[in-house]
Image (cartoon, rainbow, N blue to C red):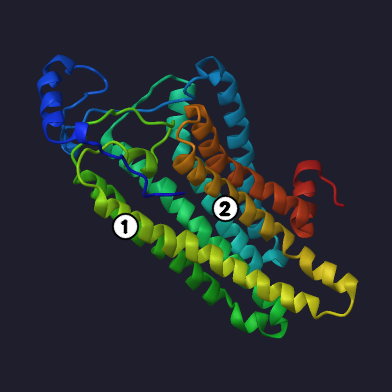
């Protein structure tokens, strides 16, 4: 997701234009928009979260849909973690990375659940500045971690296919743990400055957000100060994480494809490629919605607001819901254990 988008000022919003706003602010006190008044983070009124702008009459149905997605995501990922823990045959690097992905998807679900539940079920739309910053931190933290985990999983597939004889020596348990720690620390280091870069800015625009949760591209539109540093840092972290990770994932699959094409037997080629299908699906359902959200934010400014909201919901809700479904279908060991848990049978 693009973290750099911010407001574009025109001449009417600077100089004399701001003086005019300052004079009018006396008549706007008490308005939820707080137009023209500058507030630092300590004196900022609560942000107002938004459900589905333009489709308010459908919000109950949307909540039912989101409830189903939450249930599938939380139960599915919890089952994946349980099965990997209990099944000794799954104590391998590939499934350790899958458990990291499932744990991360649970984090995504739980970081958005409180405000989504409050907005759509209880119609509680206010959120304090600090609570909003905390939620923004965790949502983006888990997004960056998911990108890093998918990169680690692509490295696992590369070693398994291109260097199978060295697989057990390259991907030891200790190295898998080290890779997981590196993914977490990198994500923390990238996201940690964002709340503080926002806190230093004065807020004098509308305090109404575009979603039922707090996202950096949404919040960065509200300050009336200079956001150049925020934009530069946002560009840096997008390129150094999502950009770098996606490029390395692409490179790993180019090398995998080259290795697979060198296999003489077509049956063996298909069998080898089949081991990558689950990971490829996970990569696509993570990066494609992200690109869609960024493109809509940059080039779809005249589109209805609910379009942006729906794209954001797809980006945050679909990957955690589909990942356990995909891996349950494509992984024989998980499918067998899952059928035993749910049906008491094996197949």
Q: Quadrant of residue 18?
A: top left
Q: Could you say which disc has been placed on residue 233 in the image?
A: 1
Compute the Cα span from label 1 to label 2: 21 Å
In x, y percent, where is residue 88?
70, 65
Count the marks. 2
Q: Residue at x 50, y 32 (%)?
A: 309
In x, y percent, where is residue 313?
53, 36
- Work out whether 316 lies above or below 29: below
In terms of sequence position, does the residue under pointer 1 or pointer 2 come before the other? 1
Q: Is residue 268 left or right of residue 130?
A: right
In x, y percent, where is residue 268?
86, 73
Q: Nearer the viewer, residue 59 or 117?
A: 59
In x, y percent, where is residue 101?
57, 56
Q: Secondary structure under badge 2?
A: helix
Q: Secondary structure under badge 1?
A: helix
Q: Is residue 68 left or right of residue 122?
A: right
- Work out whether 298 lies above or below 141: above
């Amino acid at each position: 997701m693009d973290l750099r988008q911010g407001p574009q000022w025109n001449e009417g919003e600077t100089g004399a234009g701001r003086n005019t706003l300052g004079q009018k602010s006396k008549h706007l006190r008490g308005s939820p928009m707080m137009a023209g008044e500058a507030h630092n983070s300590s004196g900022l009124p609560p942000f107002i979260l938004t459900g589905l702008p333009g489709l308010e009459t459908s919000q109950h149905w949307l909540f039912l849909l989101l409830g189903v997605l939450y249930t599938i995501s939380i139960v599915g990922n919890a089952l994946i973690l349980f099965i990997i823990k209990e099944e000794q045959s799954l104590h391998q690097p590939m499934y350790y990375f899958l458990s990291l992905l499932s744990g991360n998807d649970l984090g995504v679900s739980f970081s958005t659940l409180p405000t989504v539940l409050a907005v759509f079920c209880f119609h509680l739309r206010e959120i304090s500045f600090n609570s909003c910053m905390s939620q923004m931190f965790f949502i983006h933290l888990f997004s960056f971690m998911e990108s890093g985990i998918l990169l680690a999983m692509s490295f696992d597939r590369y070693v398994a296919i291109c260097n199978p004889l060295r697989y057990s020596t390259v991907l030891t348990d200790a190295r898998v743990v080290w890779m997981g720690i590196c993914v977490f620390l990198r994500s923390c280091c990238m996201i940690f400055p964002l709340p503080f870069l926002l806190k230093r800015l004065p807020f004098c625009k509308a305090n109404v957000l575009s979603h039922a949760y707090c996202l950096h591209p949404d919040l960065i539109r509200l300050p009336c100060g200079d956001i150049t540093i925020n934009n530069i840092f946002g560009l840096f972290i997008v390129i150094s994480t999502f950009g770098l990770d996606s490029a390395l994932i692409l490179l790993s699959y180019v090398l995998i494809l080259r290795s697979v094409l060198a296999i003489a037997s077509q049956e063996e080629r298909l069998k080898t490629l089949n081991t990558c299908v689950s990971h490829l699906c996970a990569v696509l359902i993570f990066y494609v919605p992200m690109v869609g959200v960024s493109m809509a934010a940059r080039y779809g400014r005249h589109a209805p607001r609910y379009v942006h909201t729906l794209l954001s919901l797809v980006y945050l809700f679909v990957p955690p819901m589909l990942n356990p479904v995909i891996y349950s279908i494509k992984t024989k060991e998980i499918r067998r254990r899952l059928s035993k848990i749910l049906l008491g049978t094996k197949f």
